[in-house]
Amino acid sequence: MRELAELQQIISYTFKEPQLLERALTHKSFANENRVPYHNERMEFLGDAVLSLIVSEHLMRTCPDSTEGDLSRLRAAVVSEPALAVIGRTLELGAYLLLGKGEEQTGGRDKDSLLADALEALIAALYLDAGKDAAEAFILRFFEDVIRRTCTARTSLDYKTALQERCQEHLKQLPEYRVVFETGPDHQKQFDVELLVKGQAYGRGTGKSKKEAEQKAAKEALERLGSQEPGVRSQEK
């Protein structure tokens, strides 16, 4: 296991109470095997709450046109276990974990669940050591890429997902996207996509990529379905 001083250099923060960092990286398996009176599960709980709060505040500032449903989906994507595990690997958290022999032998240092839990516990440690500002500075620094990518993709999260849910609920069939035609040279393509449900055209969209065209077609379909199916329009406002 690496020295915790290295990790503090990576995150550009030196703990006033280093035991908080050690606790954040202590897995229950290690505590059980070595009769250590603490592990990181309670800190995961706190870290999850702090992370959700800070990400929620940031999304509200950076996505002012998003609805409550939009923001909930965006936040869920940002704080999902796979997203947290990616950041955990970026920080090489696995190398600093205190694990029991069983977890060590089964590759615990690279398990998504353990890395995500350790990252949440680390956020809690920062919060307990220096308050919300320290936790927020860490989150906005290391979550910047995933937040940006998620916000950039918010249209597909909104319209295509909402449409799929509504089609399943009301029409019992998934939408079908069909490229009607494409124009322009390879480096400047334009796609025209038609959206069909049960063979009937419900929307059409044009974009510089198939995904963009599909998103626009899904938005148009939601607007059309909104006038026919109760509750659909609220998904798209």
Image (cartoon, grey):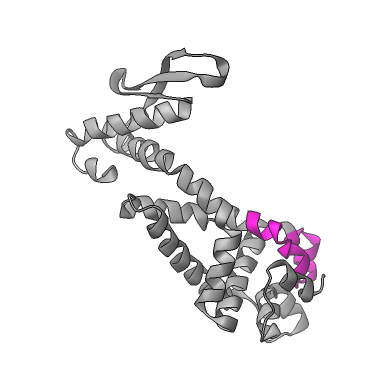
Instruction: Please tell me whether the stretch drawn in magenta is mainly helix, strand or loop.
Output: helix
Q: Residue 161, position in %: x, y?
A: 39, 39
Q: Residue 180, position in %: x, y?
A: 40, 14
Write the start and end of the magenta stretch as one range. 86-109
Count of numbered labels shown in the rendering: 0
Q: Is residue 97 visible?
A: no
Is 119 one of the magenta-colored residues? no
Q: Is residue 15 visible?
A: yes
Residue under the point 38% across and 59% down: 60
Is 87 one of the magenta-colored residues? yes
Is the C terminus in the top left, top right, bottom left or bottom right quadrant? top left
Asked whether, in this view, residue 19 is left or right of residue 128, the answer is right
Asked whether, in this view, residue 132 is left or right of residue 98, the answer is left
Q: Residue 216, position in %: x, y?
A: 36, 30
Q: Nearer the viewer, residue 182 or 35?
A: 182
90 w.r.t. 21: above or below:
above
Quadrant of residue 157 in the image? top left
Q: Nearer the viewer, residue 129 or 167?
A: 129
Residue under the point 36% across and 38% down: 159
Residue under the point 47% across and 67% down: 54
Asked whether, in this view, residue 99 is left or right of residue 88, the answer is right
Q: Residue 232, position in %: x, y?
A: 24, 40
Quadrant of residue 100 in the image? bottom right
Quadrant of residue 228 in the image? top left
Is the N terminus in the top left, top right, bottom left or bottom right quadrant? bottom right
